[in-house]
Image: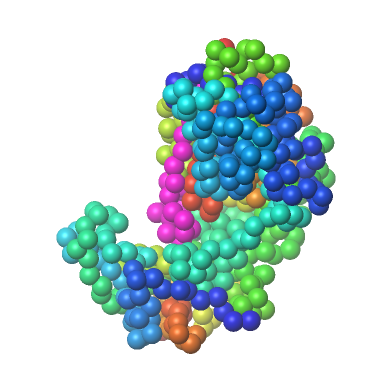
């Protein structure tokens, strides 16, 4: 079964273009400097439309997660994490933590992570893996 | 709203609850509505306001033969009915209508005439959450919980204890789906759904419905049952994406809605005799006790463990057995309201003797929305 994939909108296209280019692109307000996610053409903190896109560091920590023991058909058959990571720039995003056992022992809250990308045809999704020491 | 200006004069659930394969979603709305009208001694032509979620108020009104002068289709998840009560109170006080019917029906288990569950892949949730394998509430509503447990020093045993104590209440309720006693070990040995959640920490999936009828205080005494007055209301929303909650250890929507309702009613937590906190999962009563101000952050798990919310405790909570053991069709808020009304009428299966003030607190989506209604049976 093919993986359920996002359908970009004009307001989010830059984010998905960034993933395809191997870059995690966030936005920030040029007046209050607040970085934010998910994408939108204005600052959710102060309402200003003066915002810019910038490449994030890709560094994050593990904020919270579950390990889904009943995967959706397009996600395979093995239990997998559904996680929320806190990016070094502040915003949080949902992802899967990959590149490590999908167990409570291997998935420790606050562990350092880094972004990694995987292409699914027209869409490239950002994932996170344990940061290399 | 002006405290006490509006009353519940009709309240009922569907004739059956649980597995109802021979009735559609629309049929469940109608069954509940007809039962509530019978409870209030009314017929469809007596109703001039209709509110519902799930189905459209147009569909419900037409099906029942009602010509409303006011409708509300607010649909923000399982607490929508709390918001309907609040909006109906404002509408009646403003003179937009006199007698409001609020209906719920859902074929959560049998899926007869039910729509699908899913989000457009172009929505923010479709773009930024769905690709990672979220399926339904057990993989979304649960995502904040490991952070919450760590921040508060709570354990999975604390989650399990919530399920165990609610089962004690369910045992007193003939209409509850699950009535057999369970232990913490039973919960921790039930099948793994999404770590750290086991099956017995997750709500049921059943069929059913419920309906309420509201009118103004001056008309309320002309009905068959003693009126149950509404003295406080609150509502709020936070985010459609659980990953974007401001803080995983507290619900902003809970805090805002709860405070609004308590301020409006002019009561404090110690005045509350009976409490319903929508329990789609075992963590919800913990968040609710903290965010509504009944417990300081970090004290809710011990409060439950020490049996304050159990039968015989000082703050009876989820006395119908809750979504964990009574029933959960998908939008459970209606059943929390029904139990509050039963308690205020003095007819609940696990009646809290002498209860005068009841709080019904609902959640919608995955901490997306909230509604709070405070009732009293005192004139």
- Horizontal relation, residue B209 to residue A19: left or right: right
Residue A35, image quadrant: bottom left
Residue B359 seen in the current view: no
Relative to the observer, which residue lies in front, A75 or B77? Answer: B77
Q: Tell me the quadrant of the picture where the N terminus of chain B can be found.
A: top left
Residue A5 seen in the current view: yes
Q: How many marks?
A: 0
Q: Which residue is painted at 65% across and 26% down in the image? A: B45
Instruction: Reply above or below: B242 against B70.
Output: below
Relative to the observer, which residue lies in front, B187 or A51? Answer: A51
Instruction: Reply above or below: B170 against B315.
Output: below
Instruction: Reply above or below: B313 against B131.
Output: above
Position in image of residue B326 (x %, y %):
74, 42
Stretch in magenta: B231-252
Position in image of residue B207 (x %, y %):
74, 48
Q: Which residue is painted at 71% across and 54% down in the image? A: B113
Relative to the observer, which residue lies in front, B153 or B122? Answer: B122
Q: Which residue is painted at 62% across and 51% down in the image? A: B281
Instruction: Reply above or below: B311 against A132.
Output: above
Q: Which residue is painted at 69% across and 64% down in the image? A: B192
Q: Tell me the quadrant of the picture where the C terminus of chain B can be found.
A: top right
Does residue B164 belong to the magenta stretch?
no
Residue furthest left in the image = A31
């Amino acid at each position: 079964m093919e993986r359920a994939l996002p359908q970009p909108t004009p307001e989010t296209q830059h984010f998905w273009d960034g993933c395809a280019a191997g870059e995690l692109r966030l936005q920030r307000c040029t007046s209050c400097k607040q970085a934010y996610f998910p994408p939108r053409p204005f600052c959710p903190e102060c309402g200003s439309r003066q915002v810019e896109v910038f490449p994030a560091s890709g560094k994050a920590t593990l904020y919270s997660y579950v390990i889904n023991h009943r995967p959706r058909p397009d996600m395979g058959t093995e239990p997998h994490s559904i996680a929320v990571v806190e990016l070094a720039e502040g915003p949080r995003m949902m992802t899967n933590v990959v590149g490590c056992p999908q167990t409570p022992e291997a998935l420790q809250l606050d562990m350092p992570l880094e972004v990694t990308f995987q292409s699914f045809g027209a869409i490239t999704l950002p994932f996170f893996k344990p940061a290399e020491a | 709203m002006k405290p006490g200006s509006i009353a519940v004069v009709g309240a009922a659930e569907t004739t059956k609850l649980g597995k109802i394969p021979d009735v559609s979603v629309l049929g469940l709305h109608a069954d509940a509505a007809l039962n509530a009208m019978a409870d209030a001694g009314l017929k469809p032509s007596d109703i001039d306001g209709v509110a519902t979620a799930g189905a459209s108020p147009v569909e419900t009104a037409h099906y029942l033969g009602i010509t409303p002068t006011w409708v509300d289709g607010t649909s923000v998840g399982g607490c929508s009915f709390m918001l309907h009560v609040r909006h109906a109170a404002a509408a009646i006080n403003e003179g937009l209508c006199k007698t409001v019917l609020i209906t719920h029906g859902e074929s959560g288990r049998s899926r007869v005439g039910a729509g699908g569950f899913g989000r457009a892949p172009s929505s923010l949730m479709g773009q930024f959450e769905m690709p990672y394998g979220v399926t339904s509430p057990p993989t979304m509503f649960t995502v904040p919980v490991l952070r919450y447990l760590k921040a508060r020093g709570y354990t999975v045993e604390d989650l399990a204890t919530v399920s165990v104590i609610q089962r004690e209440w369910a045992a007193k309720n003939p209409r509850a789906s699950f009535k057999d006693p369970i232990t913490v070990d039973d919960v921790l040995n039930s099948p793994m759904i999404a770590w750290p959640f086991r099956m017995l920490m997750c709500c049921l999936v059943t069929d059913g419905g419920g309906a309420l009828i509201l009118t103004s205080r001056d008309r309320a005494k002309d009905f068959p049952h003693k009126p149950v007055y509404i003295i406080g209301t609150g509502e709020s929303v936070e985010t459609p994406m659980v990953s974007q909650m401001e803080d995983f250890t507290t619900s902003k929507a809970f805090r805002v809605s709860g405070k609004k309702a308590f301020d409006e009613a002019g009561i404090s937590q110690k005045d509350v005799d009976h409490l319903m906190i929508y329990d789609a999962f075992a963590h919800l009563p913990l968040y609710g006790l903290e965010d509504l101000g009944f417990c300081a952050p970090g004290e809710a798990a011990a409060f439950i463990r020490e049996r304050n919310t159990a039968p015989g405790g000082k703050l009876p909570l989820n006395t119908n057995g809750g979504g964990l053991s009574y029933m959960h069709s998908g939008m459970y808020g209606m059943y929390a309201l029904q139990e509050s009304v039963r308690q205020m009428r003095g007819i609940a299966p696990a009646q809290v003797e002498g209860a005068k003030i009841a709080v019904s607190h609902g959640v919608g989506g995955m901490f997306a929305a909230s509604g709070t209604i405070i009732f009293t049976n005192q004139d």
